[in-house]
Image: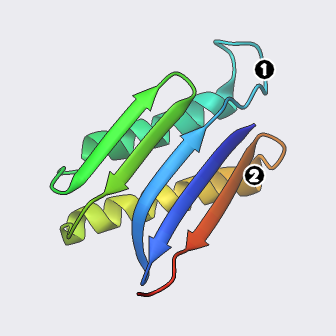
Amino acid sequence: MIEVSIKEKDGEILSITMDGHAQSDEPGRDLVCAGASCVFSGAVYALEGRNITENHRKGHAEIAVHGPVSTYDRYVLEVLKKQLIFLGNEEKQYVRVHIEELRKE
């Protein structure tokens, strides 16, 4: 199961984390895992990078926002969020998306 965690505050994405493997097919043939990896990697490469870090290793990927970001980067993060939600809705047995709205301080 791929577990996606999206943390937001005041309508802004603070982080998107993806952990696990879909295991919808044998390694190398798992299209659900490949799809999730592709949309995540595409977003990472599209981000301009100011105040954003990314970390990935086998079975884990994370994007974290550490300050103000450009409008462009906000759009990239929103598109990634929508793609992962869509994948979770289409492949419920392999992908689960959790969205956490952090409290205002």
At 38% from the left and 48% from the top, the residue drawn is 63
Q: Which residue is mark 1?
A: 25
Residue 46 percent location from the top left of the image: 26, 46
Q: CA distance from mark 2 to mark 1?
A: 16 Å
Residue 97 percent location from the top left of the image: 67, 56
Residue 21 or residue 79, whichever sits in front: 21
- Residue 59 relative to residue 14: left or right: right
Evaluate if marks 2 and 1 touch, with contact meaning CB atoms under 8 Å apart.
no
For residue 22, what is the image quadrant?
A: top right
Count residues near mark 2 (Cα–Cα under 10 Å), then give few for <14, some for 14-19, many for 20+: few
Residue 80 or residue 104, whichever sits in front: 104
Q: Which residue is mark 2?
A: 90
Does dot 2 land on a helix, a strand or a loop? helix
**Farthest front residue in view:** 105
Does dot 1 land on a helix, a strand or a loop? loop
At 52% from the left and 21% from the top, the residue drawn is 58
- Residue 27 relative to residue 53: left or right: right
Could you tell which of marks 2 and 1 lies nearer the N-terminus? Answer: 1
Image: 44 above or below 25: below
Residue 74 or residue 98, whichever sits in front: 98
Count residues near mark 1 (Cα–Cα under 10 Å), then give few for <14, some for 14-19, many for 20+: few
Look at the image and tell me in which quarter the C terminus lies.
bottom left
Residue 98 percent location from the top left of the image: 66, 61
Image: 16 above or below 3: below
At 57% from the left and 27% from the top, the residue drawn is 59
